[in-house]
């Protein structure tokens, strides 16, 4: 009888410990410094947008939302999808609907984009999301969308070696990571943070690879969390529709 009671107590302790671990993990991931959105690209459409049918830049979530509404499509999430040049053209590789519109940039220069290693976020034709180093990217006919940016935030589970934990280089930042279950997580800081803090957030979520998208110009449209930023003048916009 005593043995049976001991087994029952052990089982209770085990389940309690598991429940506490899961709860702790959820609390850890619920970081109020960030607005985040997780999506399964095999269930919802994750698409990249640059220009409309009149060959004009969408510029922001509001213009994209208006266009999609005309198509009877609902925009549920949007964020700026990488850096851009003065003419608002994408900086680095850009592929939209399997069409390469800008070539990959492997040159050396200054600024965040060129803080090597930088990387590419892309979605294959079977809706598999991938983030890889620029040097590891292979162009083929199986890529539906791609945007190049930099620097990488997390590389094979490790924070970019150039980032310093106590860096005073603070800014609003947005980025993207791939979760262990192969879903995509987009995140933007609500306040100014450094690169290390931003990378650490993706690492704690379990992302083996994560990529920085942009800085102070960053915007996020996420009505389900009452976060509605529809202004801005970007190059590429990443949008999710139902």
Image (spheres, helix red, strand yellow):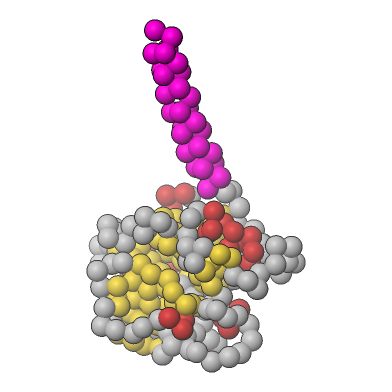
Is 21 situated left or right of 74 in this image? right
Quarter of the picture holding the N terminus: top left
The segment highlighted magenta reads 1-29
Image position, residue 33 (x, y; %): 61, 52
Along the viewing direction, whichever of 1 and 41 lies nearer the viewer:
1
Along the viewing direction, whichever of 57 and 42 lies nearer the viewer:
42
Residue 131 colored in magenta in the image? no
Q: Residue visible at 29% across and 76% down?
A: 144
> In the rendered picture of this protein, how many numbered marks are placed on residues?
0
Q: Quadrant of residue 142?
A: bottom left
Q: Residue visible at 28% across and 67% down?
A: 127
Image position, residue 62 (x, y; %): 43, 66
Q: Quadrant of residue 101?
A: bottom left
Q: Is residue 37 above or below residue 237?
A: above
**Residue 46 in sight:** yes
Q: Residue visible at 54% across and 39% down?
A: 24
Q: Quadrant of residue 137?
A: bottom left
Quarter of the picture holding the C terminus: bottom left
Image position, residue 153 (x, y; %): 55, 68
Q: Residue visible at 63% across and 71% down?
A: 161
**Residue 89 in sight:** no
Residue 19 colored in magenta in the image? yes
Along the viewing direction, whichever of 70 and 168 lies nearer the viewer:
168
Along the viewing direction, whichever of 63 and 132 lies nearer the viewer:
132
Q: Is residue 132 above or below residue 227?
A: below
């Amino acid at each position: 009888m005593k043995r049976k009671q001991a087994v029952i107590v052990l089982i209770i302790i085990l389940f309690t410990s598991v429940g506490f671990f899961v709860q702790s993990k959820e609390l850890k991931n619920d970081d109020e410094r960030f607005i985040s959105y997780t999506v399964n690209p095999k269930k919802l459409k994750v698409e990249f947008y640059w220009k409309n049918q009149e060959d004009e830049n969408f510029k922001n979530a509001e213009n994209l939302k208006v266009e999609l509404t005309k198509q009877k499509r609902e925009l549920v999430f949007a964020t700026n999808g990488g850096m851009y040049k003065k003419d608002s053209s994408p900086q680095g590789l850009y592929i939209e609907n399997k069409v390469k519109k800008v070539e990959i940039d492997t040159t050396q220069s200054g600024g965040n984009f060129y803080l090597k290693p930088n990387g590419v976020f892309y979605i294959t034709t079977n809706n598999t999301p991938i983030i890889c180093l620029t040097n590891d990217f292979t162009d083929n006919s199986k890529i539906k969308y791609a945007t190049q940016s930099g620097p990488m935030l997390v590389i094979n589970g490790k924070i970019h070696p150039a980032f310093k934990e106590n860096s005073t280089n603070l800014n609003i930042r947005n980025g993207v990571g791939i979760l262990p279950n192969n879903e995509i997580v987009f995140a933007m800081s609500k306040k100014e943070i450094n690169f290390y803090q931003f990378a650490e957030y993706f690492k704690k979520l379990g992302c083996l690879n994560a990529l920085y998208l942009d800085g102070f110009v960053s915007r996020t449209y996420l009505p389900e969390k009452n976060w509605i930023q529809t202004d801005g003048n970007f190059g590429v916009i990443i949008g999710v529709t139902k």
